[in-house]
Image: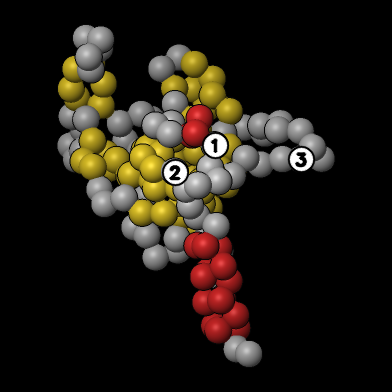
Amino acid sequence: MSSASAVRRGQAAAERDMTLTLTPQAPMDPPSFTTDPDGFEVPAFNTQSPHAGKVQSGTQAGSDTPTRYVKVAGVDRPVLAAGLHIPVGAPIPVASEQRGQATEYVVSGLGQADDPALLNRRYMVVGVPAKSFATARRLDVIQL
């Protein structure tokens, strides 16, 4: 079997496990703001077509210890390394540590075996690692 064939089989297997529906929210260019229902000014986004994905918490020897933090609105938030998995063919998101300049993903749908607590959770992309022979795009994110 060729390496390309093995990668395609790996991608198909990875995508079978992506049972969530993720709706990407792309940053406006130039940045724009809107007012939320509570009266706060928040970044405005362009909603993009939803696609499959999954949430993957990194673990190290049984503990979920973050190795990096990002400050958002004055609050330190742990980075989930490889926290979201999306298909390799999905649009590449914009990464930033500044809210309103990074793509954000909203969990907009669940599969039968998914935790209902994931619905409507929002994640901001802070890193888009790349590698050869990828079976999924693993995004570094923080939960908002």
Residue 106 drawn at (x, y percent):
37, 37
In-image side of 142 versus 101 (left or right): right
Image point 55% across, 84% down: which residue? 5
Circle 1: residue type:
Asp
Find disc 3 in the rendering and name its residue.
60
As displayed, is residue 140 above or below residue 16?
A: above
Find disc 1 in the rendering and name its residue.
115
Quadrant in the picture for the N terminus: bottom right
Rounded to the nearest whole Å, what is the CA distance between mark 3 and mark 1?
Answer: 22 Å
Rounded to the nearest whole Å, what is the CA distance between mark 2 and mark 1?
Answer: 8 Å
Residue 28 drawn at (x, y percent):
21, 38
Numbered disc in front, either 2 or 3? 2
Badge 1: residue crowd in 10 Å (few <14, some 14–19, many ≥20): few
Badge 3: residue crowd in 10 Å (few <14, some 14–19, many ≥20): few
Residue 133 drawn at (x, y percent):
57, 71
In-image side of 41 versus 4 (left or right): left
Image point 45% across, 60% down: which residue? 87
> Residue reaching furthest right?
61
> Residue reaching furthest top?
39
Residue 91 drawn at (x, y percent):
34, 57
As displayed, is residue 136 above or below residue 97?
A: below
Mark 2 lies on a secondary structure that is: loop
Which badge, 2 or 3, is on the more N-terminal residue? 3
User: Quadrant of the rendered structure where residue 92 is?
Assistant: bottom left
Find disc 2 in the rendering and name its residue.
110
Mark 1 lies on a secondary structure that is: loop
Examine the rendering and report whether any part of residue 72 can be seen.
yes
